[in-house]
Amino acid sequence: MELELRLDPADEEFVERVGRFFEADAAPRTSGRMIGLLLLAPGELSIDEIAERLRVSRASVSTNARQLEQWGIVERVSHLGDRRDFYRIAPELERTLLRHRMERLAKVGELLETGTTTPAARDERVRGRLHTLARMHGCAAEALRACCAGEG
């Protein structure tokens, strides 16, 4: 089933919400919108199709697609006899996203733990707060690590 040129309003709202979510995580909103669109697409879409559906330029789609491909979120595919590039959600997207989140949680935990050695952390309230937050982030990272290890 092909997506219509214009998205259904509920689909469009989903695409926008994914865009805002990824934007809040320091990614370009267009990248997030592309992820949302490709999550809803049963197959791959060309750069032109993505640009039309998102109402953005081909150049923006191309730039964001390259970045998403480097991050392991989308996969570029080609068809024999067709010079266009097509994109689809990468087969291991869930593991890629979980791995990224796990790494970020671990890094934040490590950063917070270094705060326990600062002069301000001589105050037990500050040191305790930093240590608790560091431990919480470490536990969350460990839980994701266990979840990822249990997959596949």
Image: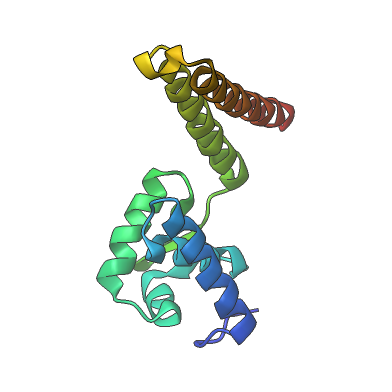
Protein image colouring: rainbow
**Closest to the observer: 45 or 125?**
125
Which residue extends farthest left? 59
Is 9 located above or below residue 36 in the figure? below
Residue 91 lies left or right of residue 19; in this view the side is: right
Rendered image quadrant of residue 17: bottom right
Q: How many marks?
A: 0
Residue 107 lies left or right of residue 9; in this view the side is: left
Is 89 located above or below residue 152 in the figure? below
Residue 67 image offset from top left, x and y in percent? 34, 51
**Closest to the observer: 91 or 6?**
6
**Closest to the observer: 145 or 6?**
145
Residue 48 image offset from top left, x and y in percent? 37, 76
Residue 149 lies left or right of residue 128; in this view the side is: right
Residue 41 image offset from top left, x and y in percent? 58, 69
Residue 66 lies left or right of residue 104; in this view the side is: left
Residue 122 image offset from top left, x and y in percent? 44, 12
For the C terminus, give its image quadrant.
Answer: top right
Rendered image quadrant of residue 101: top right
Rendered image quadrant of residue 85: bottom left
Identified at 50% across, 37% down, the residue is 100
Identified at 43% across, 77% down, the residue is 54
Is 38 located above or below residue 112 in the figure? below
Identified at 51% across, 59% down, the residue is 21
**Closest to the observer: 131 or 149?**
131
Identified at 49% across, 22% down, the residue is 126
